[in-house]
Each structure stands twice: as structure tokens, then as C-alpha cells.
Image (cartoon, rainbow, N blue to C red):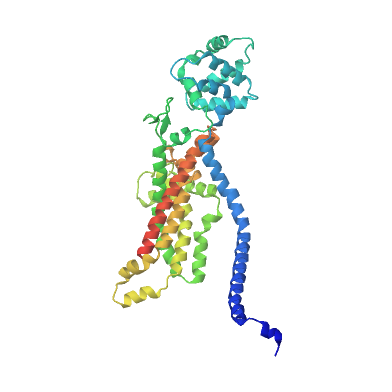
Amino acid sequence: MNTAAMALPADAPQAAEAAAPANLRRQLRTAERRRRLRSVALTLPLLAFLVAVFIVPLAGLMVRAIENPEVADTLGRTGGVLARWDGTSAPPDAAYAALAQDLAQLQEGAQAGALARRLNSEVSGARSLIMGTYRALPFDSQWSEAQVRAHMLELDPRWAELPYWQAIAKNAARWTPDYLLASVDLQRTAQGEVVAVPAEAAAFRDILLRTFEMSATVTLIAILIGYPLAYWLSTLSERRANLMMILVLVPFWTSVLVRIAAWIVLLQSNGLINRLLLGLGVTDTPVPLLFNRLGVVIAMVHILLPFLVLPLYSVMKSIPPNYLRAAVSLGSTPLAAFFRVYVPQTYPGVAAGGLLVFITAIGYYVTPALLGGPSDQMLSYYVAQYTNVEVNWGMAAALGSVLLVTTLMLYAVYRKFGKAELNMG
């Protein structure tokens, strides 16, 4: 008998059998870890792309909405002096001297211009006051603080008025909620209290409501037009459906400006539509279809309709036609079978398409700007106005942030009710 075999313990086979599953589990964990690492490595380029073109710009937008660098970067000494000022009495002589020093050390006129624009958004007339003083600098370096104050009051008596100094003191901090407050028609007083802006100056709440109202109108009309169109396409043969789908997708292949120009030709007083209405005797005078809400809605529905038809068609195409035939064979009328059996199965497509149309519509700028009147402009128009005309990046970022947050809130509500309906179903 082999003495080596006799030397093995009696439970050696059982230990080997127990070690085999452990090794197998270890190998499975290693393979799973490698698979996950491979998946992460494959998604890293897409993740980096999303971070670079989506997350970082949105984060920059949110930061710029609360950033207030114009005063903090240029009037550091003045802000330090005014931090100890009560805001109601006359500013100390040191504030005048500090302001003169800060303005004199500006390297270029662009900085003074940005500072003047920022303060002018707080107090009317601050732009001319700042620029006039900036051009008169530098003062005599031997002057005392009292002499500097007297000379500045001689240059412009408005330096004795408290609102200009209160605006400087309020905006001396680098971070401010003022832009966000202004975007919802609120403001911060010199004492730091948040109050509503005067009724004659309140506008952004109405503009935001108008934006969502117009977007909801466009979405509803797109659903009313797109649902039967998508249903009709889903009943066609594949060859004919592809041909019709090409016609639906034509707006995707045409420039937005070209489409708007075409609608201007169609909707103007002497356009094709009014000529047709006059020729048919429907109306005696041209119907105003341009530069009003109706023209904007018509053009937006035309442009955004494919965004609704595509997801609806995809959902409808996946619904077996046997369901309707089975409902009819069980005694239901065709109309009742359609609304009770077929339509509920298309809700995911309606929700997805409607949400896509709505979110796209609230950011529209060119179409309302060219086809609408002053009372038809949406929030994106004012974002562009503050960016390109007013050169107020903070206010533009605040309006964009408000639009982003409200959109995310609506999407969260949609997700909540969508999940609830899915669970009930």
C-alpha cells in the first residue's frame, strides 16, 4: 500500500470538494468585475462628452446666476469702507476717497463700462455718474479725503444721493441673490429685505406663464393633429408608411429660417391663405395671421409635429392589431374598442411625444421673434435680450436658470404621475 496515500487525512476529499465552489465563486466575481470595468470603459467617452457639453455649461449657468463680479472686482476698497456704513446716513469721506482710488486703478474703460452698466441696473443714472467720474480721474494724490469728497460733489452733485451708495454697498459681495429674485419679480432692499417689485416693473412672472401657456397650447394642438396622423401611418404597409414618414420629416431637413420665411409668405395679409379665404368668400377682409399669437402657434406646431409623430408611431406600430379584433369579437363596438383597448396602450407614446414637444417649445426664440408681436415673446427672447443688447450676463443666466428649474419640476411631476399610472395599470 502506498504510504503517501495512507498519510493523507481522512477528510481530504471533502475539503477539496468544498474548495472547488469557492474557487468557482472567486472566478465568477473576477469575471463580473472585468465585465463591469469593460462596460465603464466603453461608456467613459460618452460620459465625458455629456459632462463637457451638458453638465459643465449648466453648472456655469447656475453659478453665473448668483455671481456678482462687476462691483466686487473693481470697487474692493469702497466695498470694505461701506461694509461699516449704516446705509441711511451720509457716506463717510473715506468712501469717496476709496471710490476715487478704485476707479483710478481700473486698467481699461471696459471695466468701468461693465461696472457702470451693473450699477445702472440698480439705480437709473448710475452709468453716466460712474463714467463721468472715471473720465475726470486721476485726482491730486496730495488731496485729503475731505478734498476728494468736495471735488466729486463738484463734478456731479448726485454723489450726495444715498441710492447710488446703497447700490454699491448692496452689490459689494461677490455672490448675490438679486438676479434670481429679479427673475421672479422680487428685489432686495438696501436693508436686505426681500420685497415684490413695483407693479409697473413686474413682468417676468407673466412672461414665464405666457411661455408655458404657449408651449402647452402648441403641445395640445400637436397631439390633436399628430395622433390621427401617427395612427394612419401605423395602418399603412411598410413601403407606404416609409414614404409618408419622409414627408413628415421634411421639416427636419429644412432650415428654421427658411420655414419661417415660408410661413410669412403664407400668412401675410396678401399671402396665399388670405387670398384663398377671400376667393372662397369666407371673409371680406384679410384675416390677421401674422405678427400675433396665432401665427406663432401655427409655425411652432408645424416645426414640432415630427417630435410627436415619431414616438407615437413607434408605440402604435408595436401594438398587435389582434387586440382590437378580439375586443370586437367579444361584443364591443369598434369605437368603444378603439378608446378602451387601443388608446390606453398609446399613452406612453403620447406622454413621451408631448413632453418632448413641450420642452422643446419652451426654449423657442426665433419663431416668436419673427412671427409674433411684442406680447407673444417667450422667456428665451428676454434671455437673448439681456445677453446681446443689455450685456447683463447675470440676469440672462438667472432667467435661464428659472426656466431650467421649472422644466425639471414639471418633468419630476410627469415622472411621478407616470409611475403611478404604470403601477395602477
Q: What residue is rendered at 54% in x and 37% in y?
A: 64
Task: Please tell me whether residue 79 is drawn above or below residue 138 in the rendered image.
Answer: below
Relative depth, front residue between 416 and 340: 416
Residue 52: x, y in percent? 60, 49
If the image is split into quadrants, where does the C terminus sit?
bottom left
Residue 299 makes an appearance in the image: no
Q: Which residue is nearer to you in this view: 49 or 209? A: 49
Residue 347 appears left or right of 310: left
The answer, for residue 179, to whether it is visible in the render is yes
Say if 48 sits above or below 385 in the image.
below
The picture quadrant where one finds residue 112 is: top right
Kindly give the residue lying farthest to the bottom in the view shown: 1
Q: Quadrant of the N terminus?
A: bottom right
Q: How many marks?
A: 0
Percent coordinates x, y for residue 271 in the rendering: 45, 47
Q: At 61% from the left edge and 70% from the top edge, which residue is drawn?
A: 26
In the image, what residue occupies the spot 43% across and 39% down?
373
Q: Position of residue 22 (x, y in %)?
A: 59, 73
Q: Position of residue 152 (x, y in %)?
A: 55, 13
